[in-house]
Amino acid sequence: MAKLIITLNGLPLKEFPLDIQRITIGRNSSNDIALDDETVSGEHAAIQLNPEPTITDLKSTNGTELNNFKIRKEPLKHGDIIKIGNHQLTYIDEQAQDFASTIILDSPVVAEGECLVQGSIKLLNGTKAGEVRPIEKDRTTLGRPGVQAAVIMRHPDGFTLMAVPIGQGEITSQLNGTTLTRDERKLYDGDIIEIAGAQLQFLQQAV
Amino acid sequence: MIKLFGKSDTGLQRDHNEDLIGWSEKDGLVVLADGMGGHNAGEVASEIAVSTIQQQLSNRGQGDAVELIQNAVSLANEVIHQRAKESLVCAGMGTTIVVALFDETQITIGHVGDSRLYRLRDGILQQLTSDHSLVQELVDEGFMNEAEAHESVSKNVITRALGTASNVECDIQQQEISTGDLYLLCSDGLSDMLEANEILKLISAETALDQRVENLVVQANQHGGSDNISAILVEIN
């Protein structure tokens, strides 16, 4: 089933499964997705699933953006980003995730001066427990060769983590007790990562 | 003297072909692009890449091959990036590129992404380009081996592409060529479907060059043809 991931200022608020034919989005509480946001119109936009998933702007005051373009009515595809007011809705269609089609990693080369935050990894177990290592590269690999691997990606405003399966191996690495996937997950200060027997803590502070 | 043949095929699972190949025998130029993006934007990206690079590198005279490739790839990147910013259907589009210029004594290779160039010399097949991909980075760091990378579902994640940012870093290298060398440029639709030893066997066959290219495509389709498949073979005579 397709779903929307709703975020505000980069922080995930909730996931909304698209299990009805027409979903309305707006500030009024009568909407299927009600956004408490002054820049959102009472009835702002609607998503229709048939005959194909489509987003329509309902003549809202501030408009609806799809992948940074103002739109009136456009078909949706996996990974599309809808902007309504200060909220961002990412359209995820798991069935459309196709392992053969190439994905370009959204991992901009971040110059040192551009980083708003600094991240580090604290080792919680093993002989080097207590050691803290700063994250200094755009992509930092964690794990154990041939067993498990995950990559921390640096973005200008924070860090994300994704698992990378080794061969046909299963992913067992966890973030705060939940098994990782190939999708990026945002990291928060204090998060616990478990990978190939190692326990690590992600630490983040403003620069 | 070079002799070459190339083919690009939609494969079995896609409804359109976002790969594009181009060449000019007299300029010693071959280029291959594997585009990506929603709707038909992947085709737009690979088309801009191939046509821009062909335009820039045809009738190149005595210019420095490294500089020429660098400039041509940069220009293609700018044009695609600009187009992506101008229209919704093209937003986020990008393409890989692998380009080679052959001179009397050497080959100059530029690449971005996971399209590859292999050399067959004295019965040994060697991949001369290193993919700009997540799994390749993990191979380089020792977290997995080539076979594990080939089998990982994350192998489709690339770390560099043309058109997705205002600047792109293109890896460029030069190698001596010798008579009898055979060069293969291909998209991941070929290298994902075939093991290296299969590629070696198919391109070493004693048949005409075009037949060997056909056989590569046929074999990739027999393995499932899950992506667009492109291959160019260049023989040094």
Image (cartoon, coloured by chain):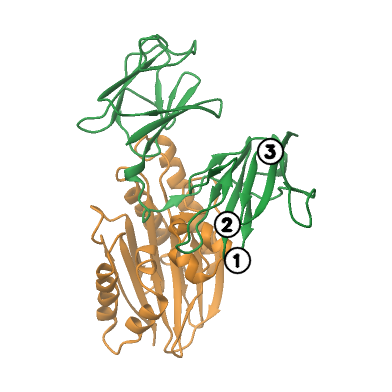
Chain colours: A green, B orange
Task: Decide if residue A116 is on the left or right side of residue A66.
Answer: right
Numbered badge on residue A101: none
Q: Secondary structure at mark 3?
A: helix
Residues tagged 1 and 2 counted as in contact (Cβ below 8 A): no
Residue type at numbered disc 2 = Ala
**Which residue does the numbered mark 3 point to in the structure image?**
A114
Please, is residue B190 above or below residue B90 in the view?
below
Residue at the farthest left position: A51
Residue sitting at x 40%, y 55%:
B49
Identify which residue is drawn at 43% across, 65% down: B151
Q: Residue at x 27, y 73 (%)?
A: B219
Mark 1: amino acid: Asp
Q: Are marks 3 and 1 on the same chain?
A: no
Mark 3, mark 2: which one is toward the viewer?
A: 2
* Residue B25 seen in the current view: no
Q: Which residue is mark 1?
A: B140
- Report crowding for label 3: few under 14, some 14 to 19, many 20 or more residues within 10 A (C-alpha): few
Residue type at the position of mark 3 = Glu
Q: SS for tag 1?
A: helix
Q: In the image shown, does B85 or A156 lie closer to the viewer?
A: A156
Q: Which residue is mark 2?
A: A149
Q: Earlier in the sequence, mark 3 or mark 2?
A: 3
Does residue A156 appear to the left or right of A68 in the view shown?
right
Instruction: Choose between B234 and B214: the one closer to the eye.
Output: B214
Q: CA distance from mark 1 to mark 2?
A: 13 Å
How crowded is the residue under tag 1: few (<14 C-alpha within 10 Å), some, or many (20+)?
A: few
